[in-house]
């Protein structure tokens, strides 16, 4: 904040919400307000260089031509102070009144509200010592009220299953007979693209998903971060989430939980590393947000909830010793049944079966003599049977491909992601074993 300038040249400010037909003791006409300002300035030995006015304008917003010009004049040092007859003429919103006075003070100017006896130029007076803190406190109260109202609105929207904000690719907003929004519905034209992108990312990596999205939705700029953001949305699991408010099953899911988990590819700066292999592989039980690794106050490794860093309120932010959590999860992984088949060999057999089915289908489709010899009905039945065999073989191949371990499957975090839908850590003083919940697929 600049040093306070000596007040000599000031501007006045006058505001009336509604000029028409106003009268009574509480009403201050523009002429009365200006007279009050000029009388005060004269008593102080100041010169009123200009009086700005906003007529028929509410004080609930600072987007007003007159006040904007007055504040700009103080900031440009055309005036040493802004004077108004009454504080509520300057503004009726506590938060915006506070911000307006701060602008004046940062420019080295003074603010005067004659009726309340507020004169921030009087450094020894009560206003200089108390008004700014009081208005600041009112501003904070206003911010909290707005935040509470917004949180309440989010909660009601989630409970109704009504989305807030931009609708994700793959969904459309349903509407009732009156045209009112009813919730998310699958978009038949784009849901399959999203599903294909998830499977591609889960089985072949982020670049494969990017290629699909760029091919089928070329109107959007599919950067790696944009693709990661789409794949990270839990809306595709049938969840509706706004801030800390979450509701499951509000709409039809596009992808299953296991594929969603395998499709996640954190950016390099956020990826798990050797020091913290479980970063983003475990979640806080209170807010469902991921936990990442860091050193605690005792210089020991720990995993903690990242909700606060994302601006999300968490009522019971979880924290766990990294050494204990990693030992626990390795022990739990050893308890899980081992696969009885070799995934690579299974994929090879499935590939051969799919190719053989495709060859037989093509050969039968080209056997025109067989159609004449067997008759149209028998020929069509044979064709349908071979199409079904081909489809079954393709499905078996896709399943085998999904079971194939990823290149980084030896990483503890990846093993955990493949073994469980989610691992949730609860805050508490109990032993870690009692605070961990495993959600199966």
Image: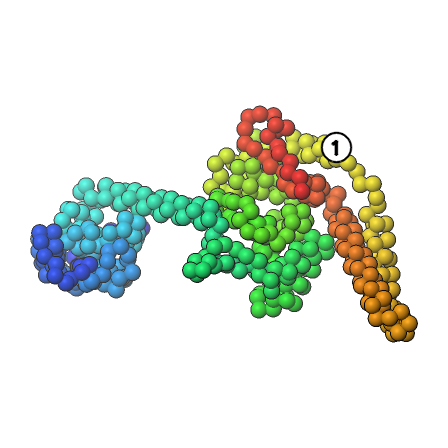
Q: Tell me which corner region of the image, top left, top right, bottom left or bottom right, holds residue 305.
A: top right
Residue at figure coordinates x 52%, y 45% from the top left: 247
What scheme was used to colour the molecule?
Answer: rainbow
Percent position (x, y) of residue 155? 44, 45
Residue at 61 percent across and 43 percent down: it is 280
Quick check: can you spot residue 299? Answer: no
Q: Which of the two residues, 402 or 62, is positioned nearer the viewer here?
A: 402
Residue 193 picture quarter: bottom right
Q: Is residue 91 above or below residue 189?
A: above
Q: In this view, which residue lies farthest toward the top?
A: 430
Residue 31 drawn above or below residue 424: below
State the quadrant of the C terminus.
top right
The residue located at (47%, 46%) in the rendering is: 159
On the image, numbered disc 1 is attached to which residue?
335
Q: Quadrant of residue 224?
A: bottom right
Location of residue 328 with respect to 251 vertically, above or below: above
Query: Could you tell me which residue is drawn at 17 percent across and 55 percent down?
Result: 84
Horizontal side of 426 relative to 36 (left or right) equals right
Task: Tell me if 106 is positioned left or right of 298 in this view.
Answer: left
Q: In the visual, does 283 lie left or right of 245?
A: right
- The residue lying toward the viewer, choosing from 55 and 371, is 371
Does residue 341 appear anywhere in the picture?
yes
Q: Nearer the viewer, residue 120 or 144?
A: 144
Q: Position of residue 191 (x, y in %)?
A: 61, 60
* Helix, strand or loop status at disc 1: helix
Mark 1 burial class by Cα count in 10 Å: few <14, some 14-19, many 20+: few
Relative to 196, does residue 430 appear above or below in the rendering?
above
User: What x and y, as percent, mark residue 91?
Assistant: 24, 53
């Amino acid at each position: 904040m600049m040093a306070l300038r000596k007040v000599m040249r000031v501007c006045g400010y006058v505001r009336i919400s509604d000029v028409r037909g106003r009268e009574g003791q509480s009403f201050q006409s523009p002429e009365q307000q200006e007279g009050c300002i000029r009388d005060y300035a004269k008593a102080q030995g100041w010169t009123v260089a200009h009086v700005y006015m906003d007529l028929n304008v509410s004080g609930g917003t600072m987007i007003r031509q007159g006040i904007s010009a007055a504040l700009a004049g103080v900031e440009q040092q055309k005036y040493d102070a802004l004077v108004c007859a009454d504080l509520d003429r300057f503004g009726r919103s506590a938060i915006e009144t506070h911000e307006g006075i701060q602008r004046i003070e940062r420019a080295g100017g003074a603010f005067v509200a004659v009726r309340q006896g507020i004169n921030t130029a009087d450094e020894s007076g009560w206003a200089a010592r108390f008004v700014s803190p009081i208005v600041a406190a009112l501003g904070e109260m206003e911010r909290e009220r707005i935040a509470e109202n917004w949180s309440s609105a989010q909660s009601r929207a989630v409970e109704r299953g009504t989305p807030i904000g931009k609708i994700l690719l793959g969904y459309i907003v349903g509407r009732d007979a009156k045209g009112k929004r009813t919730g998310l519905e699958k978009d038949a034209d784009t849901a399959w693209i999203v599903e294909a992108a998830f499977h591609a990312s889960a089985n072949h990596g982020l670049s494969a998903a990017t290629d699909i999205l760029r091919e089928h939705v070329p109107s959007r700029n599919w950067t790696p971060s944009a693709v990661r953001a789409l794949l990270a949305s839990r809306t595709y699991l049938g969840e509706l989430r706004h801030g800390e408010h979450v509701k499951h099953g509000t709409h039809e899911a596009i992808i299953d939980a296991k594929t969603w988990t395998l499709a996640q590819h954190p950016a390099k700066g956020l990826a798990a590393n050797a020091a913290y292999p479980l970063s983003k592989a475990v979640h806080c039980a209170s807010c469902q947000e991921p936990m990442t690794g860091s050193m605690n106050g005792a210089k020991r490794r720990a995993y903690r909830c990242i909700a606060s860093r994302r601006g999300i309120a968490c009522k019971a932010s979880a924290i766990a010793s990294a050494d204990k959590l990693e030992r626990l999860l390795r022990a739990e992984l050893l308890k899980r049944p081992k696969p009885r088949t070799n995934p690579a060999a299974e994929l090879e057999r499935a590939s051969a079966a799919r190719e053989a089915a495709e060859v037989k289908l093509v050969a039968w489709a080209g056997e025109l003599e067989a159609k004449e010899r067997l008759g149209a009905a028998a020929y069509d039945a044979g064709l349908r049977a071979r199409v079904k065999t081909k489809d079954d073989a393709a499905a078996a191949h896709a399943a085998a491909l999904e079971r194939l371990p990823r290149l980084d499957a030896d990483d503890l975090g990846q093993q955990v992601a493949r073994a469980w839908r989610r691992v949730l850590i609860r805050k508490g003083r109990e032993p870690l074993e009692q605070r961990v919940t495993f959600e199966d697929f």
